[in-house]
Image (spheres, rainbow, N blue to C red):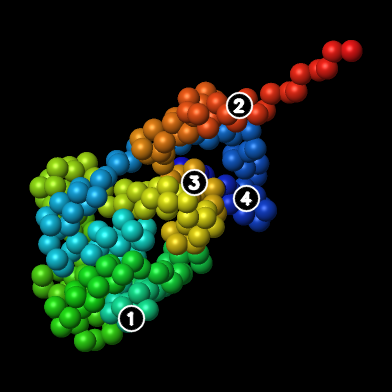
Amino acid sequence: MGRQYSCLRAVFGYAEAAELMTRPSPCGRWIRLPRVRLVDRPELRAQDFEQLATALGPDQAPMMWLGATLGLRWAEAAGLTVSRIDTKARTITVDRQLSRRRTLEPPKSVKGHRRLDCPGWLAKELGSLVRRNGLTDPDHLLFVTPEGMPLDYSRWRARVWKPACEIAGLPELVFHDLRSISATAHVAERVPVSVTQARLGHSSSRMTLDVYARATSEDGRLAAEAVGARIRPRDARGMKLGTARRAPARKRS
């Protein structure tokens, strides 16, 4: 909603400055947009990912891993070509995305251009995908339809993603959830916010923390134990530290 309002305000502002309208812009400063509620994102365990990867199959599972580990958007993963994969250096380059017209276009923002380090196992999976399908053309897309055509999101979601999620017991999972899961995993692993922001291609760290990263139930349990131990230590070390911090008794005159 914020983007649509900003665009509308810019249009009215231009019309007002160009004297194309006789009344002041209706997008005044007094307008307060309703707060956007954060979408609840699921928490997935390692076995959930494994089950989903099995259901997707070897040619589509790497796409899921790219979203979950590197935080790629669906269009970015669907737009990857052989030339953007470096299995030796264990990196991928994101500088294009697949549009709704199924053509390659630049990322949605300058921050979207990025080179990402991959975990070793994911680099091997991508290499196996290239070799298994005989992808020798550097401009060939990694993920295509059975007919070898660029993917269409709606059809891919209905024919590939949804059936696999049903089999894996994750019927409500959407691909964009993987991006939030990736951001949460980065934060949970104490990756610096600036690095997480760069890897996800966000324009600001606020978007990374406020919109995508979530507190997991495990984070909550660890926080409770840590704060509880600090406030009311039970072990000998805690009691000793508590005794050491007492002020010395005054000497009687």
Q: Residues within 10 Å of mark 4 (few under 14, many from 20)?
A: some
Compare residues 30 and 214 and report the one nearer the observer. Answer: 214
Q: Within the image, what quadrant is residue 143 found in?
A: bottom left
Mark 4 or mark 2: whose residue is earlier in sequence: 4
Q: Within the image, what quadrant is residue 114 found in?
A: bottom left
Mark 1 or mark 3: whose residue is earlier in sequence: 1
Residue appearing at x 41%, y 41% in the figure:
214
Q: In front of the other: label 1 or label 3?
A: 1
Kind of residue sitting beneath label 3: Leu
Q: Residues within 10 Å of mark 2 (few under 14, many from 20)?
A: few
Kind of residue sitting beneath label 1: Lys
Disc 3 is placed on an element classified as helix
Looking at the image, is 125 positioned above or below residue 73? below
Kind of residue sitting beneath label 4: Gly
Mark 1 or mark 2: whose residue is earlier in sequence: 1
- In the picture, the disc for residue 209 is 3
Looking at the image, is 125 positioned above or below residue 219? below
Contact (Cβ within 8 Å) of mark 1 with mark 2:
no
Q: In front of the other: label 3 or label 2?
A: 2
Residue 88: percent from the left, percent from the top? 33, 81
Disc 1 is placed on an element classified as loop
**Residue at the disc numbered 4:** 13
- In the picture, the disc for residue 88 is 1
